[in-house]
């Protein structure tokens, strides 16, 4: 499994790579768990890139072989609980996350991308949940809520009911991705530049913004703790001092 998912750290940027190109980077349960471990404790990095090996797929969903042992509803419930836990961990990652998508980004792969903070795509990207045409399963309410927040209910219905795979251009037009790059080298370069940009910004501002959006989506408690977190932080004082001193701030995330 260790070679199925790679994790590297360089110059303050972490990169997760799904590394099963022979299987279009289809995800095993062990890969999901390793991804959750990294998202929980990414190490000494300030931003995290999630991508797939090769240009054929970001990740083409969960490896179908993982379902062969299913014998009833309990297995299905345990699977969806696992996926919800992993995606929730990505959403709560202590550093900003960037999904760099080339090729197929479907099923569980699309769910991972949707849980990241930003999504950029190569021109050959294809994004969707073709389960009405393939497995005949369903998405959890958490996954539906995530998609609904990104594109709205009408697009979710269309995507699931028609099993349509959105092209990179279409994904850009509906807000699934924020940028489209011409090819994989350009995608890799832009992902690194974007992650480097985020790594230089105030960590608590980004963390509070992400959490506030998640709470709005899920009808969770208000934001008093987030406001206190930012306004009482050393980073906020540093930001004011740096602005008045006309120098770049040095963020500490505290």
Image (spheres, rainbow, N blue to C red):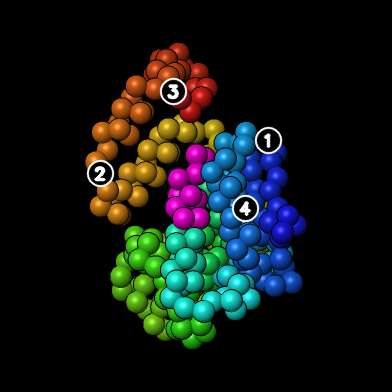
In the image, residue 160 sits, relative to residue 108, either above or below, namely: below
Which numbered dot is residue 34?
4
Badge 3 is on which residue?
A: 235
Horizontally, residue 79 falls left or right of residue 185, namely: left
Q: Look at the numbered disc 2 and give the secondary structure of its residue.
A: loop
Q: Name the spot of residue 223 as percent of width and height, x first.
A: 27, 38
Using the numbered discs, state the Cα–Cα distance from disc 4 to disc 1 in whole angstroms. 22 Å
Image quadrant in which the N terminus is located: bottom right
Q: Look at the numbered disc 1 and give the secondary structure of its residue.
A: loop
Which numbered dot is residue 221?
2
> In front: 196, or 2?
2
Q: Look at the numbered disc 3 and give the secondary structure of its residue.
A: helix
> Does the magenta-highlighted stretch encompass residue 88?
yes
Magenta range is 85-95
Marks 4 and 1, the one that precedes in the sequence: 1
Using the numbered discs, state the Cα–Cα distance from disc 4 to disc 2 in whole angstroms. 30 Å
Marks 1 and 3, the one that precedes in the sequence: 1
The answer, for residue 117, to whether it is visible in the render is: no
């Amino acid at each position: 499994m260790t070679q199925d998912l790679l994790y590297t750290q360089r110059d303050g940027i972490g990169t997760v790579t799904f590394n099963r190109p022979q299987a279009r980077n289809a995800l095993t349960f062990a890969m999901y768990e390793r991804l959750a471990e990294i998202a929980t404790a990414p190490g000494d990095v300030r931003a995290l890139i999630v991508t797939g090996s090769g240009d054929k797929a970001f990740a083409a969903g969960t490896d179908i072989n993982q379902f062969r042992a299913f014998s009833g509803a309990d297995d299905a419930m345990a699977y969806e609980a696992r996926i919800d836990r992993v995606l929730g961990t990505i959403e709560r990652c202590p550093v900003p996350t960037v999904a760099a998508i080339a090729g197929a980004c479907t099923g569980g792969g699309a769910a991972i991308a949707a849980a990241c903070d930003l999504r950029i795509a190569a021109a050959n990207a294809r994004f969707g949940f073709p389960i009405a045409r393939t497995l005949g399963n369903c998405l959890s309410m958490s996954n539906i809520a995530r998609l609904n927040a990104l594109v709205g209910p009408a697009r979710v219905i269309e995507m699931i009911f028609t099993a349509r795979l959105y092209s990179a251009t279409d994904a850009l037009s509906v807000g699934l991705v924020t940028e489209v790059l011409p090819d994989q080298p350009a995608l890799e370069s832009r992902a690194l530049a974007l992650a480097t940009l985020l790594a230089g910004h105030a960590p608590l501002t980004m963390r509070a913004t992400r959490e506030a959006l998640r709470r709005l989506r899920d009808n969770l408690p208000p934001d008093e703790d987030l406001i206190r977190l930012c306004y009482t932080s050393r980073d906020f004082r540093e930001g004011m001092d740096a602005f008045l001193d006309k120098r770049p701030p040095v963020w500490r995330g505290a």
